[in-house]
Amino acid sequence: MTEILSLIGRDKPLFSEDIAKYDSALCDIISKSRFLILGAAGSIGQAVTKEIFKRNPQKLHVVDISENNMVELVRDLRSSHGYISGDFQTFALDIGSVEYDAFIAADGSFDYVLNLSALKHVRSEKDPFTLMRMINVNIVNTEKTLAQSIAKGVKKYFCVSTDKATNPVNMMGASKRIMEMFLMRRSKEINISTARFANVAFSDGSLLYGFNQRIQKRQPIVAPHDIKRYFVTPGESGELCLLSCIFGENRDIFFPKLSEELHLITFADIAVKYLEHAGYKPYLCASEDEARELAKTLPEQGKWPCLFTVSDTTGEKDFEEFFTDNEILDMVRFDNVGVIKNEPEYHGALLEMFEREIDSMKQSKSWSKPQLVALFQSMLPDFGHKETGKYLDSKM
């Protein structure tokens, strides 16, 4: 963790005081409880799984669609923490499948269900088909697993959200905001909590993760220099989710407090720190062609070709925020965690309309991105969707 902290410009973990203060209670509760983790093999899912595993849960079943990532999760757990006395099992399942439904029907006896599955990339909204899958994963599957949890008598349901759900400007963030609306509806039947947090540094598929790939493949480093973001480490993402799951009251949304420990930094600045840590000096290029060509020769000279650009792709937010001005906050309970307190406010007819429209589109096997954008705007009147016609897949 120390290495990642230095790369994102920090020298201390964000939630160490809160974890230390509540660790005894965490260990006591977890050791007596049964957990189901969905999306367990993603970056955040692995971090949460490790936090629970090391506190010896009575039962820990983990589900993920990625068989390979699940194998690595198990190897990581065995190599770092060994074994637990409780019932630990992994299942390579698609949450939206009939096989998953059979799995829940056969057991489903859990105290806590944590849903960490998500389509998290803004690039996933570039075409109507991947966008519909985003809706399925982020919204439809959440509603489905919520209903199953209620039917099985689960005590608590946790679902991860995103800072991009606050005043969303892209479909990914808007999908998570709509997901939060569905959570509010179900909060009358089951205790729920969630978390909004910053970018997870070096998580699978992220730009920072790509830095590792570019070095291994001897390719240029490309990053925007005009966008500043907040970052947490994978371990910190697991800690925040765990705190919310165990200690969050019904409808609470946890988020990192903005402080000196959590500050904004550009992707380009992280790229420079990353290259220096790897023993290279960044060499700024003027074009993709120049960067690709210099990647053949510069590394032997202790330099690495970089292309730092202005961001102009669809869905990029100019700044990050974790809450709105009209939300009620508890900034006292935790040292470095804020809590948004919510009433069970939702528009039931609007949620039912959304479900009908999505079902109708899927039944017809025909829909367009403008249709989906219009549907999202009917759900979120202030949704400021930015369409530039440019997407990350068109960049290096």
Image (cartoon, rainbow, N blue to C red):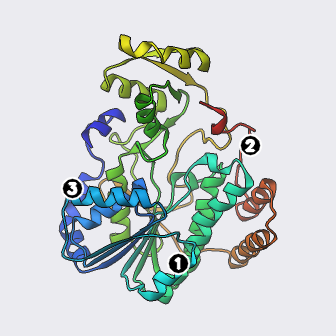
Q: Please name the residue shown 59% across and 14% down the image.
A: 286
> Is tag 1's residue or tag 2's residue first in the polypeptide sequence?
1
Figure quadrant of the C terminus: top right
Q: CA distance from mark 2 to mark 3?
A: 46 Å
In the displayed structure, 345 sits above or below 283; it is below
Please identify, in this view, whether the residue under mark 2 or under mark 3 is nearer the observer. 3
Residue 358, how many percent across, how many down?
74, 70
The mark found on residue 79 in the picture is 3
Q: Amino acid at mark 2?
A: Glu
Circles 1 and 2: CB distance less than 8 Å? no
Q: Quadrant of residue 35?
A: bottom left
In the displayed structure, 57 sits above or below 168; it is below
Q: Please name the residue shown 81% across and 63% down the image.
A: 366
> Is tag 2's residue or tag 3's residue first in the polypeptide sequence?
3
Residue 166, how many percent across, how many down?
57, 54
| Left or right of 51 in this view: 298 | right
* In-front residue for pair 178/109: 109
Q: Amino acid at mark 3?
A: Ser
Q: Amino acid at mark 1?
A: Glu
Which residue carries the number 1 mark?
99
